[in-house]
Image (cartoon, helix red, strand yellow):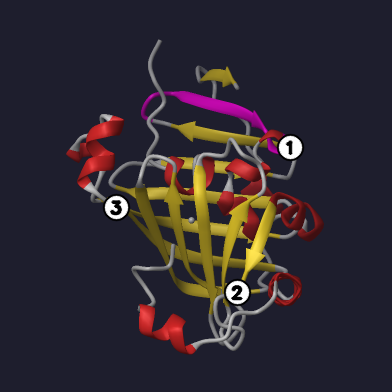
Amino acid sequence: MKMLRKTLGAVAVTLVTFAPVLSTTVFAASTPASEQQATQSLVKQLSGLRSFTANFEQTTKASGKTVVQKKGLTSQHLNQTFTGVIKVERPGKFFWETTQPSKQSIITTGKTIWIYDPDLQQVVRQNVSDQVANTPALLLSGNTNTIMQAYKVTQPDQTKNYYTLLPRAKDTAFQDLTISFGAQGTPTLMILNDSLGQVTTVHFNNVAKNVDIPASVFHFVPPKGTDIIDQ
């Protein structure tokens, strides 16, 4: 059986610390929020985000050679850059598509996640409820209460709109996820440390907040001849 490529896994299926972005000097001078304050602040950010569209650029790098060697990773897994489009409508509707260097889509309306690879004529079908803690990108489209149940929220600097989320479950595919919001309340950056010792960074640009998105964007029907793999 052909294997589905995992070009999007680092963000949306096995997927988005902040060390590459903020210096230790900034952290030393800042005052962190309490968990309650951080949670309330993140809820406020998400509550004001009814929908958004954006272009993205995603890059994955190793955090250390020792980890790479222990995990059996090679250079082809790392230093890859993918570009594409994301469209989100809360709660639960999510569309993510890479356009370069290869095309792959992740689509959900809140119940089923479809991961479609047109080149391989394959689609993986997963249950959203089984993926809440393993699918950080769904944070942007998810139900706020569900998110708070799945993650512990921290805010390293209570004056700035960036948050680091720690999975409450023990067997998740990533260690922590940081998300940053801009002045208009739109996401600008996501950074993920995964369990393989990789750091995935996603930059959002050309962001449009609270726009109308056609319902057809989130409706996926496997094309004729597509292999469907249930997980």
User: Residue 54: within the magenta?
Assistant: no
Mark 3 residue crowding within 10 angstroms, few (<14) / some (14–19) / many (20+): some
Res 74 → quadrant: top left
Mark closer to the chain start, 2 or 3? 3
Residue ID at (71%, 45%)? 109
Q: Is residue 162 above or below residue 116?
A: below
Q: Which residue is mark 2?
A: 155
Report the residue that reaches farthest toward the front: 28
Mark 2 residue crowding within 10 angstroms, few (<14) / some (14–19) / many (20+): many
Q: Describe residue 71's horizontal placement relative to residue 216 as left or right.
A: left
Query: Could you tell me how far apart the alpha carbons at marks 2 and 3 are, in whole angstroms?
Result: 23 Å
Q: Is residue 17 above or below residue 73?
A: below
The magenta segment: 119-129
Residue ID at (60%, 74%)? 155
Query: Could you tell me how far apart the alpha carbons at marks 2 and 1 are, in whole angstroms?
Result: 26 Å
Percent x, y for residue 27? 45, 81
- What amino acid is labelled 2 in the image? Gln
Q: Nearer the viewer, residue 87 or 30?
A: 30
- What amino acid is labelled 3 in the image? Ser
Element under disc 1: helix
Q: Which residue is mark 3?
A: 63
Q: Which residue is mark 1?
A: 129
Number of numbered discs overlaid on the protein picture:
3
Element under disc 3: loop
Q: Nearer the viewer, residue 220 or 67?
A: 67
- What amino acid is labelled 1 in the image? Ser
User: Residue 124: within the magenta?
Assistant: yes
Mark 1 residue crowding within 10 angstroms, few (<14) / some (14–19) / many (20+): few
Res 59 → quadrant: bottom left
